[in-house]
Image: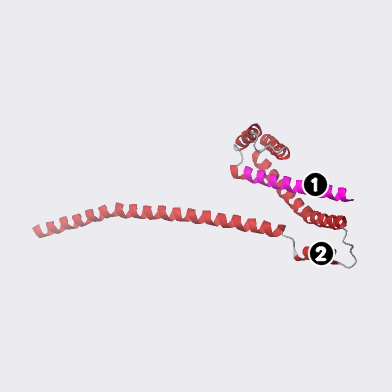
């Protein structure tokens, strides 16, 4: 009986030892889980960066003149029927640039309109008015070249803070960046159109 009692105590001691190991194993697995989650987060960030690079390269590719556009330019310059009149050549080049920029401008304009419409639907009617004001202020800052004007930037920030009640910061930045891109394209188009009118 004493021997059996010893066995019981030995069994209980073994069970007690296993119970001490269990929390240790759980802690170790918890650390591994945290490490895996951190690695997953790093991988997701790397994927997001690569996606941005791909998107940037796609846009750069869209903006790069095609072989047919270069061929058209070569034909204009080296055609035996073409006089090498500088003003005429300049006009032709401006015309080609306009032809290139116009569809790109329209595409960007449609993208911005969709972003604004989606944001207004998400934010609601009252907040939509604040979004309009935000975009109007950014346009004025761009047109007046007031990027360093602290008052103008303060207004922009104030509207962004108000809008962040309904819209994410990233959504707002995407809209503002898209508008800035569109404003630059619009400026280039106006420049090309005015140059073309001057040449005529």
Residue 183 highlighted magenta (yes or no): yes
Crowding at mark 1 (Cα within 10 Å: few <14, some 14-19, many 20+): few
Q: Is the residue 98 above or below the residue 75 in the image?
A: above
Residue 12 left/right relative to 29: left
Give the percent coordinates (x, y) of residue 101.
77, 54
Q: Mark 2 and mark 1: span between their CA atoms?
A: 23 Å
Q: Are marks 2 and 1 in contact (CB under 8 Å)?
A: no
The secondary structure that dominates the magenta segment is helix
Nearer to the camera, 152 or 43: 152
117 over 149 or under it: above or below: below
Q: What span is in magenta? A: 172-200
Q: Which residue is mark 2?
A: 72
Earlier residue among tags 2 and 1: 2
- Quarter-wise, where is residue 60 in the image? bottom right
Q: In the rendered image, is residue 168 in sight?
A: no
- Looking at the rendering, which quadrant does residue 84 occupy? bottom right
The local secondary structure at tag 1 comes to: helix
Q: Going 31% across and 55% down the picture, which residue do you hit?
A: 25
Q: Answer left or right for 35 relative to 129.
A: left
Q: Quadrant of the N terminus?
A: bottom left
Residue at disc 2, secondary structure: helix
Q: Nearer the viewer, residue 62 or 143?
A: 143
Would residue 7 appear left or right of 198 to someone viewing this image? Answer: left
7 vs 121, nearest the viewer: 121
Q: In this orientation, does residue 108 appear?
A: yes
The residue to which callout 1 is attached is 190
- In the rendering, which numbered label is found on residue 61? none
Q: Where in the figure is residue 15, as x and y percent of width and height? A: 23, 55
- Kindly give the residue lying farthest to the left in the view shown: 2
Q: Is residue 148 one of those drawn in magenta? A: no
Horizontal and vertical percent position of residue 102 = 79, 53
């Amino acid at each position: 009986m004493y021997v059996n009692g010893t066995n019981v105590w030995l069994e209980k001691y073994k069970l007690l030892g296993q119970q001490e190991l269990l929390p240790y194993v759980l802690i170790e697995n918890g650390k591994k889980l945290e490490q895996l989650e951190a690695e997953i987060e790093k991988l997701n960030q790397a994927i997001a960066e690569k996606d941005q690079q791909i998107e940037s390269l796609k846009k750069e590719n869209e903006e790069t003149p095609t072989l047919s556009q270069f061929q058209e330019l070569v034909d204009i310059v080296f055609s035996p029927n073409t006089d090498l009149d500088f003003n005429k050549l300049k006009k032709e080049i401006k015309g080609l640039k306009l032809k290139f920029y116009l569809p790109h401008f329209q595409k960007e304009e449609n993208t911005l309109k969709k972003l604004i419409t989606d944001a207004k639907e998400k934010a609601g009617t009252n907040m939509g008015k604040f979004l309009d004001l935000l975009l109007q202020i950014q346009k004025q800052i761009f047109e007046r070249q007031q990027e360093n004007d602290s008052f103008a930037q303060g207004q922009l920030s104030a509207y962004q803070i108000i809008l962040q009640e309904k819209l994410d910061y990233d959504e707002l930045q995407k809209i503002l960046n898209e508008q800035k891109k569109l404003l630059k394209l619009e400026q280039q188009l106006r420049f090309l159109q005015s140059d073309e009118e001057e040449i005529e």
